[in-house]
Amino acid sequence: MSTPRISKVFGAVNTGSFRISAMIMGLTETGELVVLGSGHRASQGIKRGYVTDMAAATYAIRDAVERAEKNAGASVQSVWVGCAGAGLASQVSKVEIEIGGRRIEEEDIEALLIAARDTIQPDGRMVLHAQPAHYTLDGAHGVANPKGLHAERLGVDIHVMLADGAPVRNLTEAVQNAHLDVEAVVASPLAAGHACLSAEERELGVALVEIGGDVTNVAVYIGGMLLGLKALPFGSNDITDAIASAFGIRRFQAERLKCVSGSAIASPADHREMIPVNGRGDEQSGPIARGADENNQIARAELVSIVTQKLGQLTDEIGKALKVMGFSGVRGGQVVMTGGGAELAGLAEFSQGALGMPVRIGRPPALKGLPEAHSTPGFATLAGLCLYAADDPIDIRAIGQSHTLTTRYGTGAIFERLYKAVKDYF
């Protein structure tokens, strides 16, 4: 049986403080989504979701995209870009127009969306998204498509995502400097929601906590919409820094300890278990840890104590954010944690006890072609960007659709990209 042809290709770039990752996804003629290639590298020039070094960020973005292109055997000219910082804020705008009891036509829906567009008040901020979440007929919610139905009044709830303009423009420029067009800048909580949350969860009510390197985004979905959003200036890098400070070691040593031996759950055996500060083959790298034995080993209990202390601070802030957004007590519900920080062992159990709500870890869906290494919570937002692009959601500010173009590698394409890079950097 022949493999279905790829009809459309979507490119995505997620710019985090810890890593910059890229993915190329194809849509087949049969409607199946296939990951053609993905790649990542250590982040440069990005801090807490903001571009801090344009040249370094541009280099890292282009490197990540070229790694994905190499794996895919295809190049992309435009990408959907994830944004975790830039002062993201979410609001809902409600609009109604009179229909008079007659049948609703396409022109009525268009007139409603135009009226909704005129109600958006960004207050000097940039609008990232302005999308119809669902329609109402005479005040009744839950209408996906009102065309052909009768009503006295037709309404719509518009979800608007706002961001600070300058950081978004810096991010866009960094991508454009890497010789890529920007299809759209997508708020990472929206992208992560596409990857980790089911439609039923978003309808019933769910909190999505995306733990990045330097920023944790807490989002609340109810009625199919993202109704609340709070960015916390705390991420998994803060845990790494606490470990490095406590033991007097370098960050790469602390990062390895956190990832390999760290846990959010203590056990009685932790006091007896000694763990090496350095990995195999790099025993001479970095200083001897404070309080280590002659073999530069520390008690696992000390490491777990530092991790849980910092996690306690984070979950306290998450709980406060959820309470402000009305997602607590009897109005609380399922919490989904994702992002690179959600890969810490025992996080779900620790957070469930701290928040008093059921917690699960959110991962990318099982997509054809998705490497096992990129099936972790740390790559959920990246996969969600491609899924968001494939859904091609309606934006009331724009008309028409646009998709990423793709070309197979050839000698001419390689030399063209090489020429552009030499021209820009030399």
Image (cartoon, rainbow, N blue to C red):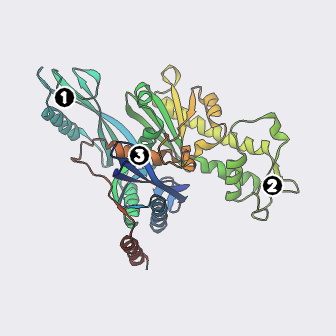
Q: Is residue 329 above or below residue 5?
A: above
- Residue situated in front as seen by the camera: 325 or 146: 146
Image point (60%, 40%), residue name: 314
Asked whether, in this view, residue 408 is left or right of residue 324, the answer is: left
Q: For mark 1, does the 10 Å Cα neighbourhood hold few (<14), some (14 to 19), or many (20 or more) residues?
A: some
Mark 1 / mark 3, whichever is N-terminal: 3
Image point (76%, 62%), residue name: 281
Mark 2 / mark 3, whichever is N-terminal: 3
Q: Which residue is mark 2?
A: 290
Q: Which residue is mark 1?
A: 147
Which circle, 2 or 3, is nearer the viewer? 3
- Residue situated in front as seen by the camera: 364 or 321: 364
Give the percent coordinates (x, y) of residue 129.
Answer: 32, 44
Q: Where does the C terminus fall, quadrant-wise?
A: bottom left
Image point (59%, 45%), residue name: 341
Find residue 1 and name its label. Answer: 3
Tag 3: amino acid: Met
- Residue situated in front as seen by the camera: 268 or 414: 414
Give the percent coordinates (x, y) of residue 364.
Answer: 50, 42
Res 16 seen here: yes
Mark 1 / mark 2, whichever is N-terminal: 1
Asked whether, in this view, residue 191 is left or right of residue 400, the answer is: right
